[in-house]
Image (cartoon, coloured by chain):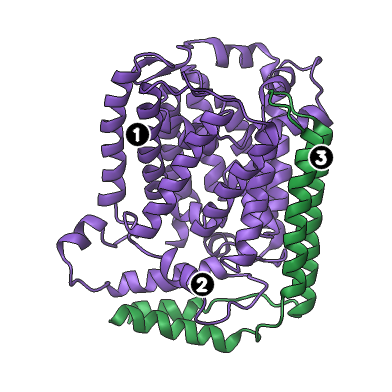
Amino acid sequence: MISVTAWEWIGLFIGMLIGGLAEAWGISNPEVLIRLGKWEDRLFVGCIAIAIGAGALALYGLAALGVGFHWGIKPDYVWGVALGGAIFGTGIAISGYVPGTVWMALGEGRRDAIFAVLGGLLGAAAWTLIYQTSFGHWLVTYDNFGLIYFGGKVDTNLTVGFGIAVAWAIIMFSIAYFLPRYKHGKSCAYNSLHKNTKLSPEEEAQYVETAGMLLEGSSMPLGKNNLPEKVNYHWTVSSKLFGVVMMSVGIIIGLTVVLEMFLHQIFGESTTYSWIVAKLWLPAGTWKYSTLVVHTIGWEPFSDIGTLFGAFLASVFFTRRFQSFNNVIPPSWKARFGNSQIKRAAGAFSGAFLMLLGARMADGCASGHILSGDLQMAVSSLEFFIFVIIFLLVVAHIIYRKVE
Amino acid sequence: MVEKDEIEQTEIKREGSEPKCKSESGIKAFIITMVGIVIITAALTSGTYNGYDPSSYSVAITGFFVIVTIVMTAIWYRTKYNNYSYEPNNETNKKERKQ
């Protein structure tokens, strides 16, 4: 069996690559996830589906051939994962962030990300406190089916696992192919069958609006006829989720996550919040959850720094969306709650609090569960995703429906 | 080619409203230098350790250099472009969509 365990600081490069690519996608902008909650822009779903499909094929194909991986699959404790997913989805709807995009947004110079980091740390601390109680213990032990994926126990039945991965990848690629990115837009499937179809006026307006939303608050001129203009006005606004650009980025992200599992561990973002809490406030030795976290986190703090730094570099050199901490309020939030900076800061703080509380309760977030876990076909991660998407859609509908 | 026309029009509008690009070679050289410093700092302070309990000092000093880079860059751009902040003309877009 081929297996390695890389030096910890190598995690910096993994984070930089994923952070840079995700910033280019635009998901560091909270409006993107709020629009997903409103079911207006499904960019995140399509891109993650491509990453999951490509990654699952590579992971189980290589594992079946004898390559060793640091699986780090998440345990399926049914109630804790479900409740965590529900709280996490609610937090995304309020803040527009997931733990990884908070770091990316900070790298992009977004002001409200500062409040999201603080809220996230408090949310992680809340879980460290709850974990110590009998309720916390019940959540992570009751109906706990352990480390299981669609093919059985982790790292077993790998040939069968590859067969399931093929079916899983077909489902994931079909989502990207048949799901229209924009509300009232057309899917890649439709476009490939109707070659000469022009964009509808609704879709044209979506392109222009999305480009404007992504660039809003940028502290630097974009310039003309250059790469950043192409990125912002053509590539990242494209409705072709299954098109060359979106698919390439999705595949690179999926393969990078597989590479990370080969080198050291799965790709995660939220444990670092609990690690910071353990180092600054609730020390290991006294607090059980802090003890668990500091001895198992691995290179995640480095990959999180890499995520932040990669998004920063992309926003200066590639997309020119660096905001220098200008006052920017996501359009959906502005339409619902007005232009108040204090209200937006409170929303980012409280949403991130819920999001991190849910993530730590479920033992993973959008990176650890939805990207890495669903790529591994972990049962817990599929359950987590289902609860997150239900609560994200319902809560976003409740919060933003008056604006419609 | 309606799609191209609309996007091109938006680009032209934006180009007219934003300040002229100035030389950014100084800040970009600084950022590239800091990329090297951040990587070297992480490598030197973490070394060949490949376990699962990272050194908090190594993480803190690496993160500190990243934060310094971001803050210095923010100050530089704010000064260079006089607190410029891009505002898309959303109202115009909405009107056009209704028509």
Amino acid type indicated by mark 1: Leu
Q: Residue B61: image x %, image y %?
A: 83, 42
- Figure check: A400 above or below A118: below
Q: Nearer the viewer, residue B87 or A101?
A: A101
10 Å crowding of disc 3: few (<14), some (14-19), many (20+): some
In the image, residue A208 above or below residue A337: below
Quadrant where the N terminus of chain B sits is: bottom left
Q: Amino acid at mark 2?
A: Leu
Say which residue appears at 36% left-offset and 23% top-offset.
Answer: A65
Give the quarter of the image for residue A23. Answer: bottom right
Q: Position of residue A315 (x, y in %)?
A: 61, 63
Q: Which residue is mark 2?
A: A227
Q: Which residue is mark 3?
A: B60
Q: Is residue A213 visible?
A: yes
Q: Which residue is tagged 1?
A: A57
Nearer to the camera, A62 or A359: A62
- Name the image quarter holding residue A279: top right
Residue type of the residue flagged with mark 3: Ala
Q: CA distance from mark 2 to mark 1?
A: 32 Å
Q: Which chain is purple?
A: A
Subunit of label 1: A
- Residue B19, picture quadrant: bottom right
Residue at the image position 47 percent from the left and 15 percent from the top: A147
Residue extending farthest to the front is: A2
Sequence-wise first label, 2 or 1? 1
> For numbered disc 3, what is the local secondary structure?
helix
What tint does the image give chain B? Answer: green
